[in-house]
Structure formats: structure tokens, C-alpha cells
Image (cartoon, grey):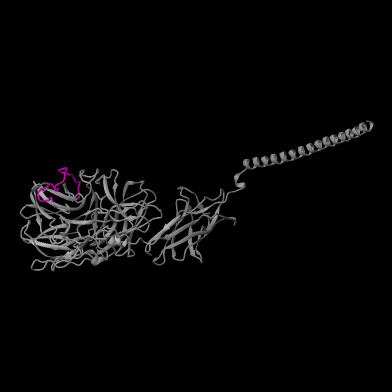
């Protein structure tokens, strides 16, 4: 037991020592921690006092570095050496109380550019001598006075010191992307001290994107007549010394993955119109909403293969537009103008299978209309091949129209057209009536003298309702000429002293890589022999020669086009400009490098000014005006400003180098915005 207590007492003594050591450690640790806190607090307070001193002192004690800038981020170049470009050098004001004796700057300029002038902004800069010298990298700019300091104040708020003018040393033939860069900028005061400006961001890109490539139609070809859209089943009307072409409005169809599919024709419920006074420059008049809930003829579901007639009724010009509601009937719309607006005067089909003589017509479509010299009117229609009746389908018809042109009289008479397929056409030449049509694609035996497959054939008569005599074919299938076939649809018309044929082919869609039934209208001449027979027609891309020159001194709608690349034509709105319609058509979807051209422009004794109506949502752009080719002589540049919105149109102008004589005219669109630059409504020149 004693031994136990002796052992316990020793343990207790050791524990007391351990506690004492622990207390001493805690006290020492606390003292050290307090010392560290005091040191840190002193450091923070010193920093705070120093900061107070800096904030309370003069900011010039730690001056911020002044900066030099180039205002333009991007300059888009033309190909031409005749055009001058401007770039502005901006700087911060001189430090307070600094008297500047001289300014010097080294500016890096690409080899292909030549600086032609340096122009001071006299609102901000006061200096006697401003010069530049060529250097290995570009130019060296010098500004100085003899007896007084150089003065620069940002009086106009622009910070502009000078404008630098430059141009190309040689014409560009390829894509270009270079930089103009300020290498250094410094000012020297009257005591010889130099201050360098910050120039890190003083860079302007100079670029030239290649011009957009035309697709489907290239100068000097006239076919297809337009290449910014499709147009099938053409029908021609001549009125007031102008040809109007009415088309089925083919538009691309897509599958769910966005791939172009074959033209189904089932969704087509619009017709389109283009017109020309010269047969080379065609004005787009947009579309006619014919069928469907938004169409004039709401009973109809489709609108194909139009025919148009003009007649004076009660002393007034009236226009009649006949169309096929798929292959089930023919409707009619009326207007006081060849371009509309159009109304449905009867609210139902003009011709259906309930009409006498139309019951057996397989395809009740493809109308053609004749207003005869004696005032009588006739409508021709029909098509299709009943099974086993390829040689004589007996599906072509002619019927008399009422005097009002919106009713029919009597029974539809058959036209015995051999190997009939579709596409009625009717013309009167002298005292002879010519009925034309497209033959069917029967692959079996054809008797000698029969029309081959898919060609335009014709019959003649001395009366508009027959009897008819088969003659021959005049136009082979488009596949014979263009390497892509399809149906053959035409219209023959006389303009001035010559005869022409309008027909369609898949030339545009073929060049786009999608020959899937999307068609474009072509024109070629028609020649009659002395005996009245028609010579065989050779289809081509060249088209026909112009019949007159284009007058540039009157308002020309921008959508009047001979050739183009990249652009579209759309309906736009004008906000309240005098002498303009509330809605109009204009060239849209303009990107850098897009262009359009007109042909055979007669400047006569000379033009000195160009005027255009434009709108822009953002930065605008420029229109470079060239003669004869896209890279021909540059006669002027129109700067297009931001107008504040697509519907805000401004008429702006620019001087042009005096130009005389007859030229093709190219409008080249340039700008730095990666999206749509601006829109063009109309243009004209002044003498």
C-alpha cells in the first residue's frame, strides 16, 4: 500500500510540472501573436496613409500614358487605282502645361498602298508644317512650328489630328487582307523632352473580298432572262411598248434536313411578273398572290401556267389573268394594270369539267388566250394522255370567251393535236392561226412526220376554232441544248417587228447543282418562211439582242437587272416619302462583293451626278460604279450612310467622272458589316 501511494505521489508531481510547462507555452504564444498583429496593423495603416496621400495629391504625379488611335477598324478596298481612301489619326490631348515643339509618328503601310496626302483637322490642330516622307515600312509623319508651340485641342470632340489619304498602287485582281499600323507616336516639348504615346490598338485592316460569282447567267448572255429567281411556264403580253412575262413561281422545296428536293408543284400558289422595254434589262414586279387563303382566288389551291390578255372595254384598259388550279380547272383574275392589283371577278373556276366539252380533258390546265382582230375572244387549254391514246390523246380544247372575258360561251371544241401532252399556245400571223403545244413522251413507235418526244409542235388553221392541220415541230426539248431535260413550255409573241419565243429550261438550277424541276425562262427569236412555215428554233444561252437603249436620266427601279450576283429582290416599305408608294420592291440581301448590272445604258452627251434611294440598318457601305465590266473604269463612288432602319429611305448623290456614250453599267457593293449592308430602291443620273 505504501509503495502504491509513493508511486501515486510521483505521478502527481510529474503532472504538476506538465501543467506548468503548458501554461508557460500558452503565455509565450500569446505574446508572439500580439506582436505579429501589431506589426500587420502598422503595415496596413501605413499603406492606407500612403493611399490617402496619393489620392490627395496631384494626379499628374503619376500620369496615365496618352494614346494614339486609328478611327477606322476596317477599310474595304475596290480593285481600282482610281479610288482614294481616307483614314483618320486620333490622339489624346497634350498633357497640361506642355508646350509641344514637334510631333513625329511612324506608320506602317502595306506595299500595295500609296499615301497621297496628309490633311490636318484645323478645328483641333494648329501647326505651320505638316509633312510625310516614305520609309521602309510606310511613312514618317512630321508636324512642327518654327517660333511657336504646336497646339492640339479636342475642340470638335473627334480627337482627330489628321486624315491620311491613300490609294492602290496597282489594280487588285485577288483577295487581300493587310494592316495599316501606327508603329510609334511621340511629341517633343520646347525643352527637348519626349513623350511617347501608347499605340497598341492603332491598327486599321484593309481588305478586299472577291466579287460574288454570277450563277446561271453571265454577261453578255441574255438567257435566262433573270437569274436571281426561278420562273416557269412563261406567257408574254405586250403593252405600251413593253413586254411582260408571267411565270409559275417556282421556289425551292426542302426536306426536314434542309436538303433541296424535287419540285412537287403542289405548294405553288403564286405567279410572278417581270417586264422589259429592251429584252435585256428585266424589271422584277414581284409575285401575285393567286390561290389559297391569302390569294385573290380563295377557292383555288394552286396557280400554274398563266395566260394574260389585254382588252379595251368601255374605253378603259382591262387585263385578264388566267391560271390553272393544278390540273382541275382554270380561273381568271382582273386588273386595270398589267402588274395588278388583281381581283377575282367571279369567285369560282372559269372552266371546270362540268362545262360542255371539257368533261374528258385529263389535265384541265395550261390556258392560252386570243383577242382576235374582230373583237372576238378565245381560250385554249387542256392536256394529258389517257391510257393507250398516246398518238391522239384528244385532250386539247378551244372555247369562245364572252365579251367580258370572264365568262365562256358554248361548248369546248377538241383540237386533234398528235401526241399532245400540254401547253397550249395561240398566235395569229397575217390571216393564219397558229396553235402550238408540247408533245408527249411516249417511247413507242411514232409514225413518220409525228412530233418527237417533248418538243414544241404547231398546227395551223384559217379560223380560231379550226379545223387544224398539223405542220411540224419548231423547238426541241431543253435537254437537247442544255443537258437537262424536263417538260417544254412556251409562248410566242411579236415585239416591234420581230417574233420571239419564251420557253423554260432548268439552266439556273443546273448551275446551282440542283436540277430538280426548278425552271427559268429563256428568249430566242422566231423566223417565218415566206410560205408561213416556222423555222426550227435553236435554244441557247446568248438570247436576243436589245431592241433599244436604257435611259439613265429617268428613275430606274433597282430591281431592273441584266446580270447580278448575291442579291435578292424583295418587297419593302417606304415610311412616308413623297411621290412613293407605301410598299415597293428593292434590291436586298446586299453583302460585301455582291453586285448587279444593267446593259446598253445610253449616257448620250454626258452624266455628271448619280442619285440613289437607299436604306441601311447599321453602318451602310459604298456603291462603286464601273463601266462595261465589274473591274472596268470607276466613274464614281456613292457613300451609303446609316439611315436608321430598313424602312427609312434617303435619296443621296455623288459626283461622277463625266461619262458619255453607250455602256454596260455595274454597281459593285462594298462594306465591312458581315451582315446585310444596305438596300437599293432606285437610281438615276443627271447631266
Q: How many marks?
A: 0
Q: Is residue 342 magenta?
A: yes
Residue 503 appears in the picture as rendered: yes
Residues drawn in magenta: 339-359
Image coords of residue 220 (percent x, y) = 26, 65
> Where the C terminus falls, by quadrant?
bottom left
Image coords of residue 645 (percent x, y) = 35, 46
Main secondary-structure element of the magenta-colored stretch: loop
Please tell me which residue is depicted at 43% across the width and 60% down the height of the picture. Answer: 207
Left or right, 386 with respect to 121, comes to left
Above-or-below relation of 629 to 308:
below
Of residues 615 and 395, the one nearer the viewer is 395
Residue 243 appears in the picture as rendered: no
Above-or-below relation of 352 to 533:
above
Of residues 597 and 338, the one nearer the viewer is 338
Image coords of residue 593 (percent x, y) = 36, 59
Q: Residue lying furthest right in this view?
A: 2
> Where the N terminus falls, by quadrant?
top right
Left or right, 21 with respect to 71, comes to right
Of residues 649 and 259, the one nearer the viewer is 259
Image coords of residue 509 (percent x, y) = 29, 60
Above-or-below relation of 12 to 589:
above
Please tell me which residue is depicted at 40% across the width and 60% down the height of the picture. Answer: 209
Please tell me which residue is depicted at 80% across the width and 36% down the height of the picture. Answer: 26
Left or right, 53 with respect to 669, comes to right
Amino acid at each position: 500500500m505504501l509503495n502504491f501511494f509513493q508511486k501515486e505521489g510521483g505521478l502527481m508531481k510529474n503532472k504538476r510540472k506538465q501543467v506548468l510547462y503548458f501554461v508557460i507555452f500558452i503565455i509565450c504564444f500569446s505574446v508572439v501573436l500580439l506582436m505579429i498583429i501589431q506589426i500587420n496593423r502598422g503595415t496596413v495603416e501605413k499603406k492606407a496613409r500612403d493611399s490617402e496621400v496619393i489620392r490627395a495629391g496631384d494626379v499628374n504625379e503619376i500620369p496615365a500614358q496618352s494614346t494614339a488611335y486609328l478611327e477606322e477598324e476596317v477599310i474595304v478596298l475596290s480593285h481600282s487605282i482610281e479610288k482614294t481612301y481616307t483614314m483618320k489619326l486620333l490622339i489624346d490631348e497634350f498633357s497640361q502645361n506642355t508646350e509641344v515643339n514637334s510631333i513625329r509618328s511612324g506608320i506602317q503601310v502595306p506595299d500595295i498602298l500609296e499615301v497621297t496626302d496628309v490633311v490636318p483637322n484645323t478645328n483641333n490642330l494648329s501647326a505651320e508644317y505638316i509633312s510625310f516622307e516614305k520609309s521602309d515600312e510606310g511613312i514618317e509623319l512630321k508636324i512642327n512650328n518654327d517660333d511657336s508651340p504646336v497646339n492640339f485641342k479636342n475642340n470638335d470632340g473627334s480627337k482627330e489630328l489628321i486624315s491620311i489619304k491613300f490609294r492602290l498602287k496597282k489594280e487588285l485582281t485577288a483577295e487581300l487582307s493587310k494592316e495599316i499600323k501606327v508603329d510609334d507616336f511621340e511629341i517633343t516639348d520646347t525643352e527637348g523632352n519626349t513623350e511617347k504615346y501608347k499605340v497598341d490598338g492603332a491598327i486599321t485592316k484593309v481588305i478586299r473580298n472577291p466579287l460574288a460569282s454570277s450563277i446561271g447567267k453571265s454577261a453578255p448572255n441574255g438567257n435566262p432572262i433573270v437569274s436571281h429567281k426561278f420562273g416557269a411556264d412563261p406567257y408574254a403580253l405586250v403593252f405600251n411598248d413593253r413586254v411582260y412575262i408571267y411565270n409559275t413561281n417556282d421556289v425551292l422545296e426542302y426536306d426536314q434536313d434542309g436538303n433541296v428536293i424535287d419540285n412537287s408543284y403542289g405548294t405553288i400558289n403564286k405567279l410572278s411578273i417581270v417586264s422589259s422595254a429592251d429584252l435585256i434589262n428585266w424589271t422584277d414586279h414581284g409575285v401575285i398572290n393567286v390561290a389559297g387563303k391569302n390569294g385573290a382566288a380563295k377557292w383555288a389551291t394552286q396557280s400554274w401556267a398563266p395566260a394574260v390578255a389585254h382588252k379595251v372595254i368601255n374605253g378603259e384598259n382591262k387585263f385578264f389573268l388566267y391560271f390553272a388550279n393544278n390540273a382541275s380547272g382554270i380561273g381568271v383574275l382582273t386588273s386595270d394594270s398589267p402588274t395588278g392589283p388583281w381581283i377575282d371577278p367571279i369567285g369560282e373556276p372559269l372552266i371546270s369539267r362540268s362545262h360542255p366539252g371539257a368533261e374528258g380533258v385529263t389535265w384541265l390546265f395550261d390556258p392560252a388566250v386570243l383577242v382576235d382582230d374582230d373583237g372576238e375572244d378565245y381560250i385554249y387549254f387542256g392536256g394529258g394522255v389517257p391510257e393507250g391514246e398516246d398518238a391522239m390523246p384528244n385532250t386539247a380544247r378551244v372555247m369562245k370567251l364572252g365579251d367580258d372575258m370572264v365568262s365562256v360561251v358554248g361548248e369546248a371544241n377538241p383540237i386533234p393535236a398528235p401526241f399532245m401532252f400540254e401547253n397550249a399556245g395561240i398566235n395569229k400571223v397575217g390571216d393564219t392561226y397558229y396553235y402550238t403545244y408540247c408533245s408527249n413522251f411516249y417511247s413507242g413507235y411514232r409514225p413518220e412526220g409525228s412530233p418527237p418526244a417533248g418538243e414544241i409542235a404547231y398546227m395551223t388553221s384559217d379560223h380560231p376554232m379550226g379545223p387544224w392541220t398539223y405542220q411540224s415541230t419548231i423547238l426541241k426539248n431543253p435537254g437537247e441544248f442544255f443537258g437537262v431535260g424536263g417538260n417544254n413550255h412556251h409562248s410566242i409573241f411579236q415585239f416591234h417587228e420581230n417574233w420571239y419565243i419564251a420557253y423554260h429550261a432548268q439552266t439556273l438550277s443546273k448551275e446551282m447543282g440542283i436540277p430538280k424541276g426548278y425552271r427559268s425562262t429563256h428568249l430566242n427569236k422566231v423566223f417565218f418562211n415566206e410560205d408561213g412555215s416556222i423555222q426550227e428554233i435553236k435554244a441557247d444561252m446568248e438570247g436576243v439582242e436589245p431592241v433599244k437603249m436604257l435611259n439613265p436620266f429617268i428613275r430606274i427601279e433597282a430591281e431592273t437587272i441584266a446580270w447580278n450576283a448575291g442579291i435578292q429582290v424583295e418587297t419593302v416599305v417606304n415610311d412616308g416619302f413623297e411621290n412613293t408608294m407605301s410598299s415597293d420592291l428593292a434590291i436586298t440581301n446586299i453583302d460585301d462583293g455582291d453586285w448587279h448590272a444593267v446593259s446598253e445604258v445610253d449616257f448620250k452627251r454626258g452624266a455628271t451626278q448619280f442619285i440613289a434611294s437607299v436604306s441601311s440598318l447599321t453602318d451602310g457601305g459604298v456603291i462603286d460604279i464601273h463601266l462595261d465590266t465589274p473591274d472596268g473604269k470607276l466613274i464614281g463612288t456613292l457613300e451609303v450612310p446609316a439611315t436608321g432602319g430598313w424602312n427609312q429611305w434617303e435619296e443621296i448623290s455623288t459626283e461622277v467622272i463625266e461619262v458619255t456614250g453607250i455602256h454596260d453599267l455595274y454597281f459593285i457593293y462594298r462594306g465591312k458589316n458581315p451582315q446585310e449592308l444596305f438596300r437599293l430602291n432606285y437610281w438615276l443620273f443627271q447631266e
